Amino acid sequence: MDTLPLREQILQTIIRKTTLKQRVFDNTFAAFNLLKETLLEFTSELDDALDGKLDRRVRLEYRDRGKFEAQLQVGSEMLIFQMQTDVFAFDPAHPVRQNGYAAADPTRGYCGAVRIYNFLSDSFKFNRNADEGYLIGRLFINGEGRYFVEGRGFRAVPVERFGERSIDRAALVELLEEAIAFALDFDPYVPPYAEHLRVTVDQFNTKMDNSKFVTGKRIGYPYEV
């Protein structure tokens, strides 16, 4: 039983947790900036490899969307990478709690996160603001720079291998390749016919404003990670 006065316990907890969370944030932010650099290089490499092999209307483009967000367009696919500014622990039922590396030291289970979303690039091109995107993966990084990825199509470092590798440029290239491969294979389905039996006049006003019609890869179909 802790015999320290409650105020002293609070002070020690503040010091311990804020120091840990700041270290996790710094590692995640450094990794995210490296991800941006890798995205830029990766796009250039793809452009060079595809030079003269694509219709000129097909775009491969990287764009920095701010301090905590970046995007990569590959033809009809748009990948959005978004770093969350919070530091997270995992609930007791999460598989990371059974990982030997994390179980040996509970502080290793505190992670920053980068979310990876997949949209149709036309949703942005035509300002279809109601269109839906899909969370296809999450990158988690802890205070020691170790990482794992969860989501569809990500096999390089699943949660069971958390602790084996540190995040670096090679790891980020693997992440990008897996994300792009999944997005390219994740084709949009034609929505069920019954979902479009009725439309409103408003949906046909303002020169057939595309934003009035919701589009997405799995509109009307269940999507599970």
Image (spheres, rainbow, N blue to C red):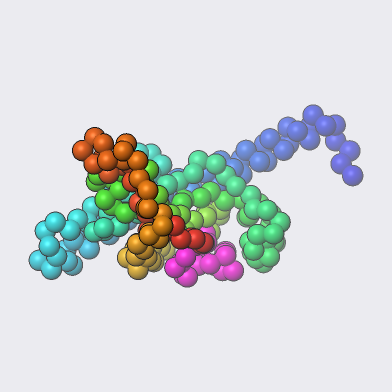
Magenta stretch: dominant SS?
A: loop
| Residue 78: image location, x then y, percent | 31, 54
Q: Where's the N terminus, which quadrant?
A: top right
| Residue 94: image location, x then y, percent | 65, 59
Which of 167/199 is in front? 199
> Can residue 7 be seen from the camera position used here?
yes
Image-quadrant location for residue 129: top left
Q: Please provide the residue range marked out in magenta.
A: 147-169
Residue at 61 percent of width and 44 percent of height:
20
Which of 78/103 is in front? 78
Residue at 21 percent of width and 38 percent of height:
207
Please give left or right for residue 117 compared with residue 4 in the image: left
| Residue 68: image location, x then y, percent | 41, 42
| Residue 191: image location, x then y, percent | 38, 59
Please give left or right for residue 56 compared with residue 188 in the image: left
> Can residue 36 be seen from the camera position used here?
no
Position of residue 12 relative to residue 178, above or below, is above
Taking the view exactly as shown, the residue that stands out farthest to the top is 7
Image-quadrant location for residue 39: bottom left
- Asked whether 166 falls inside the magenta stretch, the response is yes
Image-quadrant location for residue 177: bottom left
- Asked whether 17 falls inside the magenta stretch, the response is no
Please give left or right for residue 97 compared with residue 111 in the image: right
Which of 152/162 is in front? 152
Which of 157/104 is in front? 157
